[in-house]
Image: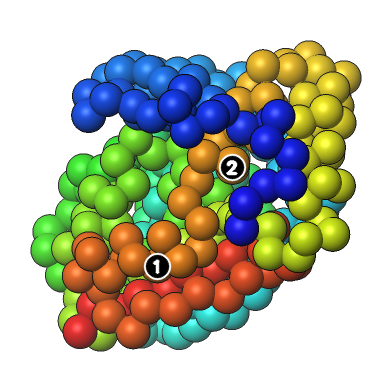
Amino acid sequence: MAMTDNSFAPSPESSAVHAEETDFGFRSVRKEEKKPLVRAVFDSVAGKYDVMNDLMSLGIHRVWKRIFVTELGPQPGLSLLDLAGGTGDITFGWLKGGGGPAIMTDINASMLAVGRDRAVSRGFVSDLSFCVVDAEAIPLKDMSVDRVSIAFGLRNCTDKLAVIREARRVLRPGGRFMCLEFSRVQVAALSPIYDAWSFKVLPAMGNLVAKDRESYQYLAESIRMFPDQETLADMFREAGLSHVRYQSLSGGIAAIHSGWRL
């Protein structure tokens, strides 16, 4: 759905990027520049990552994650690869729900360190390993895990289709890839409110709470540049996943996408 206030988004002409460029928020940068820029953002917010998600979703992300983990379907005999695992909410939910061995990963070592400390403090010491991983080049064998998850991480990846293809590659036949991400608001009345929150209130609160306005500004912009629900579903299909579907949450503020490797 189109935004109601186009002043927040770049024009089609200004947002068009060359093949060797990609988006970093509303900016166009060379592809090789994006990962260091994203890494710097999450180095900055790692210590207050949960506060960041609370600010960006008004705390509703906790409900979304519970729904997401339930959909993942934790079972003792199933293994999980959690990409862009952040501070561990999805991995811990999987283990708490009775899931089998989990690998928690993130491209950012600072984020992974926070997650590891939280795991120890919460008693998650068995059936759990940690690894710094670029989701676009997963260092696992083909058909090696049963579930792959990514929550609030795909929009920060340079080559999103590559991430989805890699997820499918490491899934066993019958395995499932699931993505939870901020998406496109589908309720017209919410759009101006959400835009004002994202681009005016959120950066100001980021500056107040974390002394980091720029990182929060990028995170808001990255949501607007992320594919809408239908486009992301098409990317799942292009990557070779089957039975692709999505569920919008909170009027489309977020969405869960799912696809299977058959």
Q: Dividing the image into 4 quarters, which one contains the C terminus?
A: bottom left
Which residue has dot 2 on it?
223
The structure residue drawn at horizontal position 82% and vertical position 56%, both measured from the top left corner, is 190
Q: State which quarter of the image contains the N terminus.
A: bottom right
Q: Is residue 171 above or below residue 220?
A: below
Q: Is residue 10 visible?
A: yes
Does the image show residue 175?
no
Q: Residue furthest left?
A: 142
Q: Position of residue 108 (x, y in %)?
A: 44, 31
Work out whether residue 20 or residue 139 is closer to the camera in this orientation and state it: 20
Query: Residue 61: which quarter of the image?
Result: bottom right
Q: Amino acid at mark 2?
A: Ile
- Identity of the residue drawn at 68% across and 69% down: 249
Near mark 1 (Cα within 10 A), the count class, few <14, some 14-19 or many ≥20, is some
Identify residue for label 1: 233
Q: Position of residue 154 (x, y in %)?
A: 44, 48
Q: Indicate which disc, 1 or 2, sits on the residue closer to the N terminus.
A: 2
Count the numbered circles shown.
2
- Amino acid type assigned to the residue bearing label 1 in the image: Ala
Q: Which mark is residue 217?
A: none
> Which residue is located at x 27 percent, y 80 percent?
242
Q: Residue at x 47, y 51 (%)?
A: 227
Left or right for 4, reference 133: right
Q: Tell me the SS state at disc 1.
A: helix
Determine the secondary structure under disc 2: helix
Looking at the picture, how far across and down is residue 21, in whole percent? 30, 24
Position of 14 with respect to 9 (left or right) is left
Say whether residue 231 is left or right of residue 175. Answer: right
Which residue occupies the foreground of this view, 150 or 241? 241
Distance (Cα) linking label 1 and label 2: 16 Å
